[in-house]
Amino acid sequence: MNVLWLARAPHPAKSGHPVPWMTALAANLVAQEGISITVVSYNPYIDHDDEVTRDGVRYIFLKVPDDKWDLLTGYTRRIKLVSDYLRDKVGNQTLGTFDLLHIHGTEEQYPVMAAGLNLPKVVSAQGFVTEYYRYLPNRPDYRHASWAVASYYEKKYAPSVRHYIGRTHWDKAIIHKLNPKAVIHHNWELMRPVFYQPIAPPSDQSPNAMLFVGGLHDIKGIREALRALSLLRERWPLRLIVTGFGSKPALLDLISTLGLTNIPEDAVEHRGMLTGEQLWAAYADAFCLLHPSYIDNSPNSVCEAQLAGLPVVASDVGGVSSLVENGQTGLLTSLDPANIAAAVGQLWESTSLRQLLAQQARAVSLERFDAQHITHHTKSIYEAVLANP
């Protein structure tokens, strides 16, 4: 089977937004299932078109205009560039003859770019910008325009593909909303290899910090996390470790803006962008992952923490409840800081609860994210699409 992927793939030199779970799946499909895979990806950060082969997978990177400049055209320049390439190289079989097209996500205009290809198609659901858009902060920024344009394309071209791969109750509902005639296949994603290794189980000597990996993005709930920390510190000397976008000075400025006078400077850390190995190591410095996001489908931050054995407190939004069974594999909350603080406090006071959630979440996650099963089931989905394109 020869499969063409359209996806945002990491370039060896300038990755943009790396997606290691996707490259791992491609490598596994080649090695374990004998499938040939070519990945076409656009990238504004490279100097020229490029091609590399890695782990038996062929990657083709197309240079496109800077995102913010192309936004002024409604992203028509990158759409045309990739569409023309596909029509020329795939239509004329210059890249070879493909049996199937696998599109990763609806938010990057890949379904638009592939609209002219006469191939059986399947789309993997990721985030849906149509839904995420409504949770942007009220203050206008670049994302309002970018996501509005992306939402237009997402809604217009979602019905052009019949087969979808979903993971949660939420993404399947959104798929049917965008395309009532869609055929939906269930499959999970691979996690980064380091998170399959267990961390030390919770104990009475667990550190007094919560881990928040959403950076300083409002949509990830940084304000709710800080307000919850402020409430918690009325009873316990708890701390918050932040990773991702932002800096320690910006974090302290936000605390000041929110008027949270009982959060001293030494009660928060900002560790910046971390590799998978660095994040796994950071788990040892926390007693839970705090994820009070406004909207998410199946956030890898939650999946990875559960898999490694770090207890999770997460907001019950989007598809998160497909990952977290409240009281069994984590704790679900609203976005009310008092509710978040109550759940975290319950977890902090009970070593046995932390141990239970960590143990049960890891057991479920090892089965859910089993690499061999996910790889083989992906091939089965391809076969189902080819049998009924």
Image: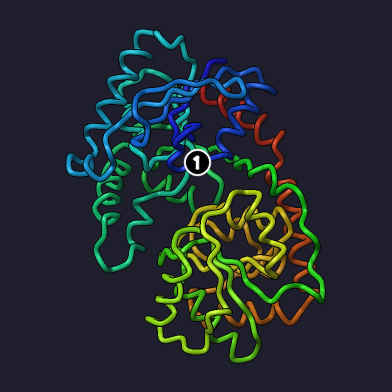
Seen at 49% across and 35% down, the residue is 10
Seen at 62% across and 71% down, the residue is 210
SS of the residue at dot 1? loop
For badge 1, the amino acid type reads Pro
Is residue 108 visible in this depiction of the protein?
yes
* Left or right for 16, reference 23: left
Give above or below for 260 relative to 147.
below
Give above or below for 132 relative to 212.
above
Is residue 389 visible in this depiction of the protein?
no
Way the structure is coloured? rainbow
In the image, residue 244 lies at what x, y percent?
50, 58
Determine which residue is flagged by label 1.
18
Nearest the eye: 65 or 110: 65
Give above or below for 70 relative to 251.
above
- Quarter of the image holding residue 242? bottom right
In the image, residue 44 lies at what x, y percent?
33, 36
Residue that extends furthest to the bottom in the rendered view of this protein = 234
Nearest the eye: 181 or 82: 82
Seen at 27% across and 32% down, the residue is 78
Seen at 70% across and 79% down, the residue is 348
Callout 1 crowding tier (Cα within 10 Å): few <14, some 14–19, many ≥20:
some
The quarter of the image holding the N terminus is top right
Nearest the eye: 377 or 184: 377
Give above or below for 242 relative to 7.
below
* Left or right for 181, reference 364: left
In the image, residue 51 lies at what x, y percent?
45, 20
Number of disc labels: 1
In the image, residue 322 lies at what x, y percent?
59, 56
Nearest the eye: 180 or 317: 317
